[in-house]
Amino acid sequence: MIRFVLMVNKQGQTRLAQYVNMHNIEERCALESEVIRKCLSRTETQCSFYEFRGYKVVYRRYASLFFIVGVEGDDENELAILEFIHALVETLDRYFENVCELDIMFNLEKAHFVVDEMLMNGCIIEVRGTNAKRTHARAPERRSACMPAHLSNAH
């Protein structure tokens, strides 16, 4: 089961962090900094996954961003997680039309929507990305339909 998804640049700055289980801020910061430090220090010839604090950490670098996924349990296949990362990158690329780090930074909510559409409670539910992209076109109307009238008119 996937426990966290991180998008990090080459300088180690977190651009997106999404956790399935809520951790307090201190635990998140400590976990992120150690995982990021370890991923950035590994060479390209080393394997793209390792074990850390009871998690299997699977990562892949695309251009200037590292996509890092933390998995709990021994029943998860590391290669399937690498395939999920690739599908996530392809979906972001289609959604933002050639995604880059700035797209993630300035459209953080939309990037979270993409991850939300592909993951549910730590389980991968969408790997093609087509449904995720279609859902984002309706995201503002869906969000306003869920909000009470006095909050949705505040904009």
Image: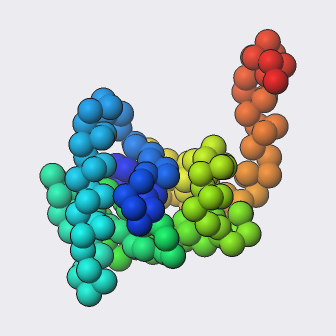
- Marks counted in the figure total 0
Residue shown at 24% from the left, 42% from the top = 30
Q: Is 153 situated above or below 133? A: above
Residue 99 position (above or below residue 148): below
Quarter placement of the N terminus: bottom left
Which residue is found at the position 80% from the left and 52% from the top? 137
Question: Which residue is painted at 46% across and 58% down in the image?
Answer: 7
Task: Report the residue that reaches farthest toward the front.
Answer: 11
Query: Which coloring applies here?
Result: rainbow
Q: Nearer the viewer, residue 125 or 102?
A: 102
- Residue 70's spot in the image, x, y percent? 31, 56
Whole-percent x, y for residue 135 in the image:
73, 52
Q: Residue furthest top?
A: 150
Is any atom of residue 128 visible in this view? no
Locate residue 67, reporting x and y percent: 43, 64
58, above or below 70, in the image:
below
In the rendered view, does 69 fall on the left or right side of 142? left
Quadrant of residue 24 within the rendered picture: top left
Q: Visible in this render: residue 147?
A: yes
Q: Quadrant of the C terminus?
A: top right
Please tell me which residue lies in front, 10 or 85.
10
Provide residue 140's location: percent of width, then percent of height.
78, 39
Q: Is 113 displayed left or right of 6 in the figure?
A: right
Q: Residue at x 76, y 57 (%)?
A: 134
Q: Nearer the viewer, residue 62 or 132?
A: 62
Quadrant in the picture for residue 152: top right
Tell me if 113 is positioned left or right of 75 in this view: right
